[in-house]
């Protein structure tokens, strides 16, 4: 029994030692992996609902409200001063500029990841 135990231990050690000799060297930095395309679509332009602006002054207020009632619309007044309207215009301009920048960022990412010339 002691003899069989020694043979098993020696066999196991031989298998373990021979198993280490078959380890191959990893080539981590030698294998170039191509970049996967991003497939990022450009954001679609926002689909805005059509608006009808009505300018109400002290001279035409009664006429405008009467016309709205004729059309079956509730005559409600949402007002902006001339300065607030200017702010509204500036805000939309900033939103538009931000969207243009975001589109440029997406274009740059696409160019970096999908352009074949930069890989060479």
Image: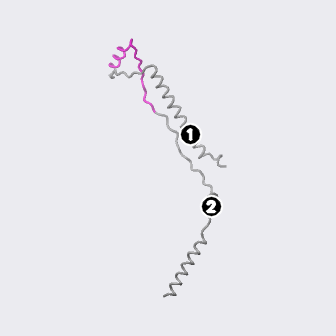
x, y percent for residue 19: 57, 73
State the CA–CA distance, disc 1 to disc 2.
34 Å
Mark 2, other Cα within 10 Å: few <14 / some 14–19 / many ≥20: few
Tell me, for residue 27, which label it has, or none: 2
Mark 1, other Cα within 10 Å: few <14 / some 14–19 / many ≥20: few
x, y percent for residue 118: 65, 46
Task: State the scheme by which the image is colored.
Answer: one colour
- Which of the 4 image quarters holds residue 85? top left
Q: Which residues are magenta?
A: 47-70
Residue 106 within the segment the image draws in magenta:
no
- Which of the 4 image quarters holds residue 23? bottom right
Tell me the residue at 55%/46% (across/down): 38
Tell me which label, 1 or 2, sits earlier in the chain: 2
Tell me the residue at 49%/34% (across/down): 45
For label 1, the residue is 105
Query: Extreme top residue here?
Result: 59
Q: Is residue 82 left or right of residue 63?
A: right
Vertical order, 84 against 33 (above or below): above
x, y percent for residue 102: 53, 37
Q: Label 2, secondary structure: give it.
A: loop
Residue 58 within the segment the image draws in magenta:
yes
x, y percent for residue 40: 53, 43
Tell me the residue at 35%/19% (across/down): 68
């Amino acid at each position: 029994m002691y003899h069989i135990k020694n043979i098993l231990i020696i066999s196991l050690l031989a298998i373990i030692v021979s198993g280490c000799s078959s380890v191959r060297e990893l080539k981590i930095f030698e294998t170039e992996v191509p970049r996967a395309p991003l497939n990022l679509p450009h954001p679609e332009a926002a689909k805005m609902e059509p608006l009808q602006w009505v300018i109400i002054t002290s001279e035409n207020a009664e006429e405008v409200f009467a016309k709205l009632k004729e059309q079956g619309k509730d005559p409600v007044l949402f007002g902006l001063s001339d300065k607030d309207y200017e702010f509204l215009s500036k805000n939309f301009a900033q939103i538009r500029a931000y969207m243009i920048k975001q589109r440029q960022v997406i274009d740059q990412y696409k160019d970096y990841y999908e352009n074949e010339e930069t890989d060479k």
